Image (cartoon, helix red, strand yellow):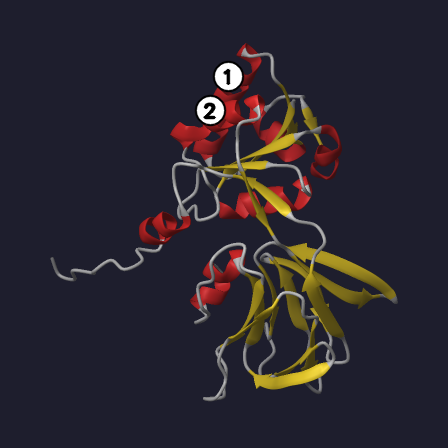
Amino acid sequence: MKFGIVINVSREHALVLARQLCEWLDARRVDYVFEALSAEHLHIDNSAPIEELSKQCDAFISLGGDGTLLFTSHYAVTKPVIGVNVGYLGFLTEFTQAEMFTAIEKVLQGTNTIHTRSQLEATVHIDNEVHSFRALNDVVIEKGAYPRIPTFIIKLDGELLSSYRADGIIIATSTGSTAYSMSAGGPIIAPKSNVVVITPICPHMLTVRPIVISDEKSIEVSVDSPDGSFPLNCDGILKKMLLPDESITVRKSSVVINLVANENRNYSEILRTKLLWGREHNFGQ
């Protein structure tokens, strides 16, 4: 088995952990290759472009936070990803640094379990060509630097849902429901639920609320505005500036993400420990 390793190079501790990982893998004669930028910061030659790793590797190791895991998962395609938390929240990253080697051992032995997560696919025309972008967490269209309040028109399977006067629209998977969507007032949805949540950002309408729909629906979003350009982000990465006469279509992707599961914790525990779910706040004490 060969591992592809991706590091958050802005975190010194992730680089230290990566060197320890190299020693551990070398001692067991396990093959591995680093993503090119990670290898550059470690000053080693064993590297490949991130776009090539899924062709060379059987599984991935992500050393960083949730952002690093999202980045790694995109290029891993369907290969298993071991997420090791070297960040702050670590909601998606299943393993602590102390649990890293045990997790890798299980993958090597084939005794690990997998969390399969659905993705979204956003389709848009760029220069008369159709381009598609995948997102594990969310697809977001925002007003950006536009000085006025635009109107976002949303259709489901070709039928008008509503027109939203808002600062933006978040279309999130069940996995992404605890990310930007939750911060904008959207509901928490259990993973593997076959739904998508549409959450407006700062709506300028008292009657607008987030809506949960089947992930089999096709969602079309366009911006009703006389001018301006509007950022289209997939998992926090800018993909295009959307113009008023353009639209995007968001559907459930045929490509899933496979995350190596930590059998010692469950989703309810994650809500309690990471989001302080149900915990009393004793202010002033």
Reply above or below: 78 against 255.
above
Looking at the rendered structure, the kind of residue marked 1 is Trp
Q: In the rendered image of this protein, does residue 157 appear above or below residue 253?
A: below
Residue at screen point 50% across, 82% down: 203
Of 55 and 141, nearer the camera is 55
Marks 1 and 2 in Cβ contact (< 8 Å) = yes
Q: Tag count in the figure?
A: 2
In the picture as drawn, the residue positioned furthest to the right comes out as 128
Q: Position of residue 110 (x, y in %)?
A: 57, 26
Left or right position of 42 against 93: right
Q: Which residue is mark 2?
A: 101
Across and down, in percent, residue 67 comes to: 53, 48
Residue drawn at (73%, 29%) of the image = 56
Count residues near mark 2 (Cα–Cα under 10 Å), then give few for <14, some for 14-19, many for 20+: some
For this orientation, the residue located farthest to the left is 285
User: From this viewpoint, is residue 149 visible?
Assistant: no
Query: What SS does tag 1 mark?
Result: helix
Image coordinates for residue 1, horizontal then vertical, percent: 65, 22
Quarter of the rendering containing residue 233 = bottom right
Q: Which mark is residue 24?
A: 1
Instruction: Classify the position of the C terminus by image quarter.
Output: bottom left
Mark 1 or mark 2: which is in front?
2
Residue at point 70%, 57% (across, down): 253
Q: Residue at x 71, y 33 (%)?
A: 53
